Amino acid sequence: MNIVKRILNSFKNTKEIEDLEEINFITIDAKEIVKEHPDALYDLYHSKKHGFLIKNFLNSEEISILQDFAKHNIEREVAKTPVGYTYPMIFQEFSLRNKDLKPEELVLNSKLYFENNEAFNNNFHQTTKVDLYNKINTIFENLSGGRKVEVPKGFENLGRYLFGNFRHLDPNGGLMTVHCGNYFGKNFETVYKHLVQKIKVTNQMSYFVMVQKPDIGGELSIFNLRWIDGQGKSGFSEDEEVFCQMEQ
């Protein structure tokens, strides 16, 4: 029969939790990381390094422009979250909204979605005067050991995925949902059925560019527990419990 246990409880009172490797984020200037860690993406993927806090990626003028852009796009079509919203619509929200559509409806919706994404990517510099798209691509290429970095094309090779999006957290709204890339495929099948044909989706790397200092809070919390096959959650936005499905 199937026995469901809380995976966190399985670590309690065991030496296993004491043996977990300490997570170490390296704080470094944007220019220095390019010189000192030219293969950082490879090192991150293979857990040779755990993460970087990169300072001075944007200057004060660029940050001010991006803050103003985000503020004036509140009235546009945004994707609501339990603690705020995102703009433009993130692929997770697109996947959830379209998972039950008929094939012909999905074709039309996805064509519009990915073409809008490509327009956002291409027009962002002209709209804001901040070349964020190329800044992100360039630093990733400089940290990739000479590998090419690009944003994948959308369904049927139409349009593109977003190079990034704005996330707004409401005051007193709580934290952003705990992220685990290896779990996403079970929740956002509309998109992941396509992504697995384009890229290796296991052990993804995440990046955040902070454009506003929070009044309180704002910490990035990393949990040193790796997702393993058979784990799950009761829902994507549920952060209290992680379950392990075991056979007996």
Image (cartoon, rainbow, N blue to C red):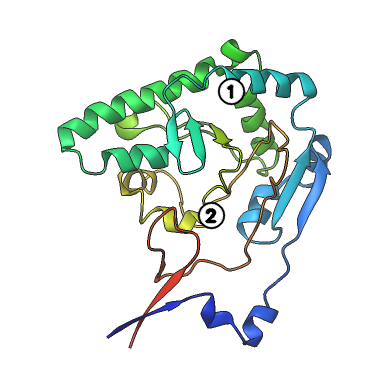
Of the pair 138 and 184, the residue shown nearer to us: 184
- Mark 2 crowd level (few <14, some 14–19, many ≥20, 10 Å Cα): some
Q: Which residue is located at x 38 percent, y 39 percent?
A: 93
Where is residue 131? Give x, y as percent: 64, 20
Quadrant assignment, res 133: top right
Helix, strand or loop status at disc 2? loop
Query: Looking at the picture, how far across and down is residue 138, in whole percent?
Result: 66, 30
Q: Which mark is residue 113?
A: none
Label for residue 70?
1
Judging by the rendered image, the residue that carries numbered circle 2 is: 178
Q: Which residue: 42% across, 79% down?
A: 5
**Where is residue 200 drawn, in percent x and y?**
46, 51
Quarter location, residue 43: bottom right
Q: Residue at coordinates 72% horizontally, 63% vertically from top-left?
A: 23
Q: Amino acid at mark 1?
A: Ala
Mark 1 surroundings within 10 Å by alpha-carbon count, few (fewer than 14), some (14 through 19), many (20 or more): some
Q: Is residue 89 visible?
A: no
Q: Earlier in the sequence, mark 1 or mark 2?
A: 1
Residue 246: percent from left, percent from top:
37, 80
> At 44% from the left edge and 53% from the top edge, which residue is drawn?
237
Q: Three-letter amino acid code at disc 2? A: Val
